[in-house]
Image (cartoon, rainbow, N blue to C red):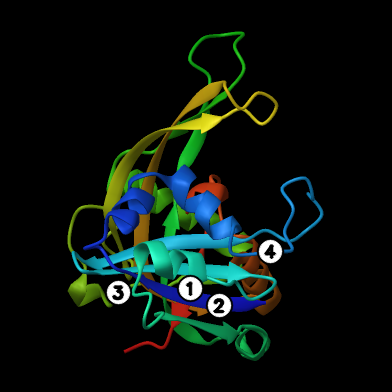
Amino acid sequence: MHLTRFRLNTARSGARRLLSSPQTMHAAVMSSFPDALPSDTSTSRVLWRVDRNARAEVFLCIVSPTAPDLTHMAEQAGWPTAPTWQTHDYAPFLARLTKGDTWAFRLTANPVHSIRRKDGEPTKPTAHITPRHQMGWLLQRQEAAGFRILEKPPEQRRLPEGDEYELTVHDRRDRSFSKADQENTRKKHHVSLVTATFDGRLEVTDPEALRRTLTTGLGRAKAYGCGLMTLAPVG
């Protein structure tokens, strides 16, 4: 596995075009793997995420089985004369994960739940809208995902409910875009999704489960920049 980080040049129209549509960004990311065929469903999933740290500090993070070639993105949306991406072998880091370790983390996800609007109708995935419910979505999945979100000391806790965790929700977005039909490229599907970015601190409870989470993603809409969790040393 490989972890890649690419800085987008937001002054360029190509970068703004990529950032305007998860579908367009997905296509650009997948074009970074010359050996990946759209018809091959047996290959491991490529995960990606956009981190908007500041207006002129926007990064694309990618986790993939093989190293990407981002030359085309550097030419369209970066600095062509000085390509700004770094790829690292992810396997040694993943192998070192140990139960009880604590890490800072970031995750962009599509928090949804299934509801039935009328009796007799099938359930339908529906987005969580409020930060409290979005936090609840992640807290419900932490055990199976191999980690436990740390709790604040009692003296640092405040209302409302949910503030007891070392967890914040930010960059909540409503995304809407068109997607071409795989069988009929002239036909378009309308896609809407709500995304949220989680920053927090966690403790590793199941290293193998966490490795799966870090390499296969968490939640839905992975093709559209959701599901990728990354870890960093606790500052």
Identify the mark nearer the N-term, 3 or 2. Answer: 2
In the picture of the structure, the residue carrying the numbered disc 2 is 3
Q: Which residue is mark 3?
A: 152
Q: Residue furthest front?
A: 81
* Crowd band around label 3 with a 10 angstrom C-alpha radius: few (<14), some (14–19), many (20+): some
Residue 221: x %, y % from top left: 53, 45
Asked if marks 3 and 4 touch (Cβ < 8 Å), the reply is no
> Measured along the vertical axis of the image, is residue 17 above or below residue 198?
above
From the image, tell me which residue sits under label 1. Answer: 230
What residue lies at 77% left-to-right and 45% top-to-bottom? 39
Amino acid type, label 4: Pro
Secondary structure under tag 2 reads strand
Q: Residue at x 67, y 77 (%)?
A: 1
Q: Which residue is mark 4?
A: 34
Q: Are marks 2 and 1 in contact (CB under 8 Å)?
A: yes
The residues tagged by marks 3 and 4 sit, at their Cα atoms, a distance apart of 46 Å
Q: Which structural element holds mark 4? A: loop
Give how far apart the Cα atoms at labels 3 and 2 are: 30 Å
Mark whose residue sits in front, 3 or 1: 1
Q: State which tag comes first along the sequence, 3 or 4.
A: 4
Say whether disc 4 or disc 2 marks the residue closer to the N-terminus. Answer: 2
Dot 3: what SS? Answer: loop
Q: Nearer the viewer, residue 80 or 215?
A: 80
Q: How far is the residue under mark 3 from the one under mark 1?
A: 21 Å
In the image, which is nearer the foreground, mark 1 or mark 4? 4
Single out the mark in the foreground, 3 or 2.
2
Q: Earlier in the sequence, mark 3 or mark 1?
A: 3
x, y percent for residue 53: 25, 69
Q: Amino acid at mark 3?
A: Lys
Question: Is the residue marked by circle 4 packed among few (<14), some (14-19), or many (20+) residues within 10 Å?
Answer: few
